[in-house]
Image: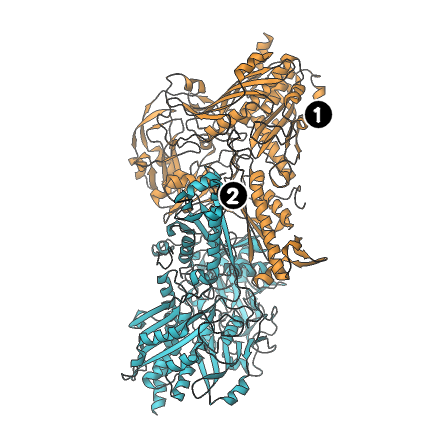
Chain colours: A orange, B cyan
Amino acid sequence: MKSISESKARLDGEEKVTGRAVYTDDIRLPGMLHAKLLRSPYPHARLVGLNVSRAIRLPGVAAVLTRDDFAGLNPFYGFSVKDQPVVALDKVRYAGDVVAAVAAVDEDTAEEAASLIEVEYEQLPAVFTVKEALVEGAPLLHENIKQKHLPKYGRGCTGFFHEGTNICFHFRYERGDVEEAFESCDHVFEDIFTFPRAQHCSLEPHVSVAYFESGGLTVWTSTQSPFVVRQELSRIFQIRLNKVRVVVPCVGAGYGGKHSAKFEPLAAALSQKTGRPVKLSLSMEESFKTVTQHSATIKMKTGVKKDGTLVARQSEVLLNTGAYAEAGPLVIEKAGYRAHGPYRIPHVKSDAFAVYTNTVPAGPFRGFGGTQVAFAYESQMDMIAEKLGMDPLEIRLKNVLNKGEEFAPGDTPIDSDLKEALKLAAKEIGWHEKGRSPYRGKGISCALKDGGGINKPSNALVKITEDGSIVLSFGTVEVGQGINTAMAQIVANEMDMPFENILVAPLDTTSTPYDQGTLASAGIAVTGPAVQRAAQDVVRQILEIAGMVLGLDPATLRFGEGKVHYGENQSLPLRDVMIRHFGGTGGEIVGTGFFKVSRNNDAPLGYPCPFWEVGIGGADVVVDPETGEVKILKYISVTDAGKMIHPNHCRGQDEGAAMFGIGHTLFESMIFRDGQLMNPNLIEYRLPNFRDLPDHFESRILEGGSGPGPYGAKGLGEGGILPVASAVTNAVYNAVGVRIKEIPLYPERVLKSLSLKND
Amino acid sequence: MKSISESKARLDGEEKVTGRAVYTDDIRLPGMLHAKLLRSPYPHARLVGLNVSRAIRLPGVAAVLTRDDFAGLNPFYGFSVKDQPVVALDKVRYAGDVVAAVAAVDEDTAEEAASLIEVEYEQLPAVFTVKEALVEGAPLLHENIKQKHLPKYGRGCTGFFHEGTNICFHFRYERGDVEEAFESCDHVFEDIFTFPRAQHCSLEPHVSVAYFESGGLTVWTSTQSPFVVRQELSRIFQIRLNKVRVVVPCVGAGYGGKHSAKFEPLAAALSQKTGRPVKLSLSMEESFKTVTQHSATIKMKTGVKKDGTLVARQSEVLLNTGAYAEAGPLVIEKAGYRAHGPYRIPHVKSDAFAVYTNTVPAGPFRGFGGTQVAFAYESQMDMIAEKLGMDPLEIRLKNVLNKGEEFAPGDTPIDSDLKEALKLAAKEIGWHEKGRSPYRGKGISCALKDGGGINKPSNALVKITEDGSIVLSFGTVEVGQGINTAMAQIVANEMDMPFENILVAPLDTTSTPYDQGTLASAGIAVTGPAVQRAAQDVVRQILEIAGMVLGLDPATLRFGEGKVHYGENQSLPLRDVMIRHFGGTGGEIVGTGFFKVSRNNDAPLGYPCPFWEVGIGGADVVVDPETGEVKILKYISVTDAGKMIHPNHCRGQDEGAAMFGIGHTLFESMIFRDGQLMNPNLIEYRLPNFRDLPDHFESRILEGGSGPGPYGAKGLGEGGILPVASAVTNAVYNAVGVRIKEIPLYPERVLKSLSLKND
């Protein structure tokens, strides 16, 4: 295979390192206005009065957007439930909720004008934690949400809305009979685990430029999912999908935080009102107040035989989804579905709840609910092993699903060798030498998530000219993961053409064919086959044309190295084939490709997952007994790429995911006090930095070859985050004998646990 | 049929009438420079020295581009022959030839800097007319042209280059034996006709913005043929075709003057030199000095039987192609091939020469060589009729080709009923009442040209979303002719969807599939079928998907009115089909279409023409015997659209073509004195204005249904220009008995003829 398994120079590398890359914030249009937002200082309040007269009189102000602009309209958006208004209507639901927006000639003027808006609030009782929100009689965030519809699940799954409560969505997955099974177990474990709320911290905050003109809307935006944004805008502004053009310049990362509509509707509304292009660039603090990961409380009850055989698991997963649903219902579904982990457990029941609170909305985040539950089940696994006197590796190897075994009836069989991965991680971490140094310990963890999205219809277009130039077009967004480069490699291989000949077309919903965007590690695995098929379609057409030109049966021809080969060692260069067929001015051959997974009502979620994304971690840590500080000396991340198209990018993705895990394991947590976010910036919100890197940090990527993508490729970039927290807390337990069920591992938290143990 | 034969509101109408339409000159990029040209004041001179030091020192100047920037390179371009350098190298060849170019912060600075460039010229003897150019020992314009290659003709055609002469290209078409045939004729007529040089006068002059960055080149340009421009840029700058992105904003008309590269290479060279975007906007005067129509001298020898049967015709066509070949070789080929007109003439020989002179280059122009020869053969036809005592209508009806009869063996049979058209024109003009008023007369004329280009491989893409939004993409440029609207109508009809649902995607060579562009009236007839097929491909896929969704054989389904119909009166809306197939987030179905005419070596030009474009004119004029002024009282233009997709646009195209004819018949001519263009502006170059409109001016469009386009459509927009000059001069003869063989009909020219007659 050509170009495959080679770490090609990334297509966007030069423009990015030289600063020439155009991000949305670089878009400047004639007459463009700049927008600023007025946000609620209160976590929950009724909007009694709004007076914008001082703001609108400020010179340079073009428009102030408030609820009055939406009288009689239905300005709600949201990926799962349409519960978030473009600006607050009757009330605000979190400190930071958008009350109004100003468009002015520059940002300073817009900001000053926003400060001149007079708002009368009537504060309401608020709930900040899931616990508070679920108390009987707790104040409700949403009294009356429209546009809710239950997903069409397959076998074993149910979804519920609980009207009149703060439960945004309740997902249940059930098989076997857990109640009865617990009775038969030798041991039953029941623990509660607590997971923090992390922020995506994309280096580029949310930025959108919108321009309504001639009845059409063009939006340049930093998004992972331009077609999803297009759909929201079409619905909100009641214009046909082809009247909305979403263009995606360079994107400075997403990690889930730029999935689905964010401030595109607001920027568009301001443009509609002013008739001019409007740019809205959030600050980092504002991005913190836009969307976050879900914090979680997980109650996990697991029944085992005394030989370590897992028999039954009942999970209650509570995710704090903040003030608006966002993708909460989907995240909770995935968290619930994944809660029994990569293990053979006959009796399973998960009840998972996304719960509204008066905090920043939580949405998609790398790991997508799988991270939180993996922390729970892989911590508990060590507790079970401890209790049974088993080795943590041994109990995992005993129970982990084999390659080819079903995770759930009807779903895709496990497509990676988890035992091999576990053994590799253990070997790399020096598992059998653990416990030899004081305060030093080793931990292991194994997790998985269903990858690729449950339903992602993907298209691709490839066209070729007589000089062998190739243009490739598809709708998965390059957010830094290197998808454009990898897709070009696939085309190069399929067409046996030089990688350098391939250009990936800019992403623009008008010209790019549909794709749901960058999500669920689906790029290579789901859009990849569409790209591959489009390339194959072009080759088919080249041979068809060559057949006409040469007067030969196309089936006897082969395209390779830019030539059509025929007869005995004869060949005709592509240029000649095309010029002979099209004439002297040349032409193009256009190919299309499509891929999607088909619905299967037997699959619990209604669709079998395209692939299983796996994450196996091994950690070697040392705990400072004086300070409580946990230092990761060595971390090994193991995953299975199926086939690595671009090995360096694969490792980069997996390392990045593991670093995310290290972040929330050791440092990261959004701190709310009375509903106020206390650390919405990169000073007070602690990201891991270079000094926090493990001394030895390595990603080992298997190539099991069983993915649905080209050459057996699977997706990756999320697996690596899943096992980190449990691998590290397991190692901490191994080091100092304390079981910490709440992360991050702040030194004071570790120290407190140590002192409790020593008490 | 839905949407067809309806004069829909044009898709670009609102943005154009409100001034919101974005033309190339409206493009503004950060850091953009503005270019101005330094042009030669001499028609022919050696470039001895160039000193740019004063120019480059002027504050605000970023770069001066001269021949020194192309040392060792091959900066020649040209549609047919690569003979035109981006800037003058060794010498200048016409007054207006580009010597150097300046890029500066604004146009004024650039202009001032251009004036500071010191040029030392050594004047050379020059030739301005074809006659001067063909004199033995005449000064040569091009001593040594590279990249010439002879076209691959079919039966009867030959091409020649005559090295060491000013003949740019010599085309010969021959069938039968004219020499022998003339011997057998009862009468032989030999006349010389002279046709002026018109200018395209697009309201928008040539404008280009070029930006070289990261090894790629993006050009926004007012062009008719973005893919042809892409090819030139790729070749000149030695970068792959997909590294050149040509974007076409709104175009303010072309008429042939914006076909192939004009100043795109120069703007690109300036951008390459400066590393910044560069805009070059020509003035109207500069457009006059960029490209023009070909003036012509046509010697026509025709032998007839006494009953009026045409037997033999020998033509010598001399076109003044100016200083560079441009599309001259193609224009001369068409002029030569069309010189025997729409008549049954067994013996034909044409020798047609495009001749270099030290004047502005001549290139494609509405009618493409057909206009000039039609003036000759349709003037002579009346002279023959006069001599034989026949009615001009009668002699035409006797000799004109029948529908289905061959124009030339191997070429497409005549696909319009020319007799019907002639009779209609005669009837409308009141043919049988002619000659009843003094100084008033009627004339008739019938001409044709091969339409659609000889080889135009066209692609189209159509995609549809679940709300029935359709995006259509193709590479024929909307230059005002209404092609976008008509193509949308075709898609609407093929898909049985509302016209309003269709968006035509912006034209951008990266995303738009290949097409040669707007030329040869080929849009509907040649690209139309590609569009139609792409729409049909989408319908096919809709039915295929619906078959899967419904569990039915797609062959039993029908798509109509946005629904899939099945069983007995059952239907499923498109949205349901797509959502059921793609899932809740929707998706797109992408279809492709391709069309081209196949090479046929029997056809004289190597390809049979896609269709015949016909133009039949009837004129009723009055001549003022005092002033010589010719007033057209009534003009009837008859053509055959095959099928009118958009009747108003069809009429508009035909009326516009006829108005062009009225222009060169009565007023228009570019006047050169010693090689200096004397009237390069719309004051001194006289376009017809509203007062010049015939009192009665009507286009009658037949729908013969025999075109290759959708529903039998042919192209139109050029036929109407062909017969005007001869219809009017024939009418003048009928009015006052003078035969004027040189146009335009300046009053003093008419008066002189009158006085000569009366002498």
Residue B727, horizontal then vertical, whole percent: 37, 78
Q: Is residue B438 left or right of residue B674?
A: left
User: Of the numbered discs in the image, which one, if any, rests on residue A475?
Assistant: 2
Dot 2, how many residues are within 10 Å of its Cα: few (below 14), some (14-19), or many (20+)? many
Amino acid on which disc 2 is placed: Gly
Residue B4, horizontal then vertical, whole percent: 38, 58
Q: Which residue of the protein is positioned furthest toward the top in this rendering?
A: A759
Residue occupying the point 42% across, 33% down:
A78
| Separation of residues labelled 1 and 2 (CA atoms) | 40 Å
Residue B475, can we see it?
Answer: no
Q: Nearer the viewer, residue A327 or B247?
A: A327
Q: Quadrant of residue A400?
A: top right
Quarter of the image where the N terminus of chain B is located: bottom left
Amino acid on which disc 1 is placed: Lys
Q: Which residue of the protein is positioned furthest toward the left in this rendering?
A: B437
Residue A462, can we see it?
Answer: yes
Residue B326, horizontal then vertical, whole percent: 52, 69
Count of numbered circles on the image: 2
Disc 1 is placed on an element classified as helix
User: Of the numbered discs in the image, which one, if any, rests on residue B209?
Assistant: none
